[in-house]
Amino acid sequence: MRKTIKKYLIFLILLLALFLRAWKIGEFPVGLNADEAAIGYNAYSLLKTGKDEFGHPWPISFQSFNDYKPGLYFYLVLPFVKIFGLSELAVRLPSVILGSLTVLILYLLVIELFGSRLLALSSSLLLAVSPWHLHFSRGGWETNAATFFITLAVYLFLRALKRPIYFIFSFLIFILSLYTYHSARIITPLLIFGLGFYYRKEIFKRANSSWLIGSFIIGLILAAPLIVSFFGPAGASRFSGVGIFADTGPIWRVNELRGQHSDPFSLIPKILHNKIINYGINFFDNYFSHLSGDFLFISGDEIQRNRVPEMGQMYLMEIPLLLLGLYSLIKNKPKNWLFLLWWLAIAPLASALTFQSPHAIRSLNMVIPLIIIVAYGLVNLISWIKKTFSLKILFILCFLFFILYLWNMAFYLHQYYVHYPKIYPAAWEYGFKDLADYVRENESKYDKIFITDKYDQPYILLAFYLKYPPEKFQTEAKLTPKDRYGFSTVANFDKYFFGPIDLEKIQRKSHVLIIGSPEEIPESGRIIARISNPGNLGDAFRIVEQ
């Protein structure tokens, strides 16, 4: 009877997870970020031509902004674009589905790790309402797909220790995670190493298993194209752009500190002040910033697209539960507790190797071990209250805790749906959909259309919303040279030109439409149309003509 009730409970939790991730997914987040537009338009291009936006046939990494995005999520989006057309819904729905399924996989994983259905239910419920996981399940984020595949692969590995046939499925899913997101290419091998070390005795018992050996061989074969691609432009482009060594700050700091010595070129300054030490300090600062209370509970990620105003990555109510969970794990040393801590320890590593830290996207897989630890703290707290107080007191305390948690959740949802669109509209490049509608209706009147590049990668957003024919785009679009972060863009296609708006220079031309930001086009300009931000809180775009 109890098992039946728990099955109903996990079903209700999954419904809650799906509802929170799917409700108004085409409208919130407002707008569409450039990476989502790139995923959608490239999937659209594949459907129409069998090639990506730049004419590469069925690539495993998409050149996009010269950041060579791993391709699996593009291919997951492809059937949804076929069914729903090129739209926000089509780009985001795979993430919604995978995010919801992660809640189920976590339930199964916790049962395998700790053998407790109560802990499994608690973990799934907390993940279902987690601000961190919710945020990245509601957009076309490859990191969310990678987190699903990593969690599923770990679960299948644990199942394989009992039934070796699951090894082949575990290795297959681990490999898929490598094709999904850059961070997984660091986290996945480290997780596999941790699994291999921690469960080495169980694995050695099956060393002669054809399933284990066959799975390893199949994994190498499937990973081969990815390994080969590392030696091409896809291998170095991303890390050279956002990697920790792209930040020249530590080098300037070395020069500054050496300059404070009487002889900057003597042995002591070289030993104490050098790139190895300074970049090492940066790495550890990046790493531990992901474990800071400010990032986890107060302010969250600094990048507006990755955060909700006045929220951390987790709820404030989870602070005592996380501390209690860590204490209880170390004290009780339940089965598999060391592997859980290993997962938590390696989870921020990929993000720490970049100069933007803490970074909620690149460290998303942290949410899995953190949620399990919080749930472990919750279960132990309830157990202690149950032993210490009467049933009536237990009910009152649990009810108060539920009310406080519900308030935290309600505050997050209020911030997300009411304030987030109005405070950070530019983070989601709001206005391009309305702008595309305006351009579509009026483009025949003009020889050229100039559009500001104040917002990230405007060319791909316009191509997305115009549903610009990919066969034409492939012949017209050319990427600019890489910027200091390793990214490129498209400066023009057809009659559309993207760049800073300088009215004095453009005024020399005739029959042109000029679309700029409020900073570029003052109120004194002859504005013929405006694209407003959500709630009419200022202009996203101002439009003039010559």
Image (cartoon, rainbow, N blue to C red):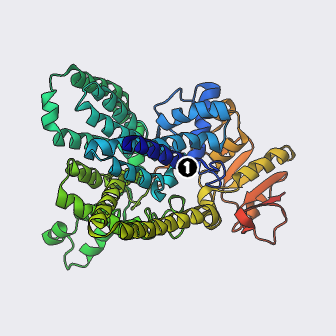
Across and down, in percent, residue 360 comes to 43, 57
The image shows residue 154 at horizontal and vertical percentages of: 31, 39
Residue at the location (64% across, 30% down)? 82
Q: Residue at x 41, y 36 (%)?
A: 179
Judged from the image, the secondary structure of the residue bearing numbered disc 1 is helix
Residue at image point 63% right, 26% down = 49
Q: Amino acid at mark 1?
A: Arg
* Label 1 crowd (10 A; few <14 / some 14-19 / many >=20): many
Q: Residue furthest right?
A: 445
105 in relation to 251, above or below: above
Q: Which residue is mark 1?
A: 21
- Asked if residue 292 shows in the view, the reply is no
Quadrant where the N terminus lies? top left
The foreground one among 404 and 262 is 404
Is 184 in front, or is 243? Answer: 184
**Residue at 31% of width from left, 67% of height from top?**
385
On screen, residue 73 above or below 534: above
Q: Is residue 264 in view? A: yes
Q: Is residue 516 left or right of residue 480?
A: right
Q: Quadrant of residue 102?
A: top left
Residue 407 in the image, given as x and y percentages of width and height: 51, 68
Quadrant occupied by the C terminus: bottom right
Q: Position of residue 531 (x, y in %)?
A: 76, 59
Name the side, left or right, on which 91 lies relative to 539.
left
Q: Quadrant of residue 476?
A: top right
Q: With 8 as the anchor, is 470 left or right in this view?
A: right
Front residue (pair 352, 12): 12
Drawn side of residue 390 relative to residue 258, left or right: right
- Which of these two is toward me, 396 or 312? 396
When the figure is inspected, residue 329 is found, relative to residue 468, above or below; the finding is: below
